[in-house]
Amino acid sequence: NWAGNYKVKFWDAPWQNIIFSYIDTIISQGFDGIYLDIIDAYYYWQVENPQKPYADTLMISFVKNIRNHISSVTPDTFYMIPQNAEDIVNSTNVSPAQKSAYFNAIDAAGVEDVFFYGNLDEDNNYNPDQYRLTQLQEYLLNGKQVFSIEYLTQPAKIQQYISAVTAQGFVPLVCVRNLDQL
């Protein structure tokens, strides 16, 4: 839904090698982690444009491949944090072993719009997504921190969010959707 962005066949080895090359560059520049957006792309290939009925397991394999690549090129701690797609661990085809491997591959989870989901870019009404909150508790139980992002500008909503997110045990971030200011 963004100009210049496309759903790619992330399971293709040549495409994964391009990603590994970018990760090598990121590591060589001294960064200590990566934030993986659009992990939920598996849903596109599995449900919306059903070309890969096991896209959920292919995405978990891709995340594991990223972790294995990172481990092969640096002995240093290097964080890997997927954004959204928290329900991938309970997706249709994911086995308990794959679920465990996914949790072992990642260091935390990032999520957007869990408490204030809606059609506006910022300042939607408070409407916690109970399904997602339940999924995210599983991350905490597996020792993974949850970084929650809400796009808010109104002080009362920000305070409401801080209270709600803290009660869940998540780390909050409030900003605007363009991510160009805090």
Image: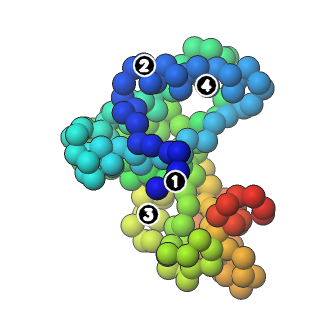
Q: CA distance from mark 2 to mark 3?
A: 33 Å
Q: Residue flagged by tag 2: what amino acid is it?
A: Pro
Instruction: Of the two numbered discs 3 and 1 on the same chain, state the one appearing first in sequence.
Output: 1
Instruction: Of the two numbered discs 3 and 4 on the same chain, state the one appearing first in sequence.
Output: 4
86 relative position to 122: left or right: left
Q: Nearer the viewer, mark 3 or mark 1?
A: 1
Q: CA distance from mark 1 to mark 4?
A: 21 Å
SS class of the residue under badge 4? helix
Q: CA distance from mark 3 to mark 1?
A: 24 Å
Q: Which x, y percent locates residue 140?
A: 53, 53
Tally of numbered tags: 4
Q: Nearer the viewer, residue 42 or 159?
A: 42
Q: Residue flagged by tag 3: what amino acid is it?
A: Arg
Q: Nearer the viewer, residue 102 or 9?
A: 9
Provide the residue designation for mark 3.
132
180 relative position to 86: left or right: right
Instruction: Of the two numbered discs 2 and 1 on the same chain, state the one appearing first in sequence.
Output: 1
Residue 179 seen anywhere in this rendered image of the structure: yes
Provide the residue designation for mark 4.
22
Q: CA distance from mark 2 to mark 1?
A: 24 Å
Q: CA distance from mark 4 to mark 2?
A: 13 Å
SS class of the residue under badge 3? helix
117 relative position to 170: left or right: left
Q: CA distance from mark 3 to mark 4?
A: 31 Å
Provide the residue designation for mark 2.
14
- Residue at horizontal 67%, vertical 34%? 33
Provide the residue designation for mark 1.
2
Instruction: Of the two numbered discs 1 and 4 on the same chain, state the one appearing first in sequence.
Output: 1
Q: Which x, y percent locates residue 102?
A: 43, 36
Q: Nearer the viewer, mark 2 or mark 3?
A: 2
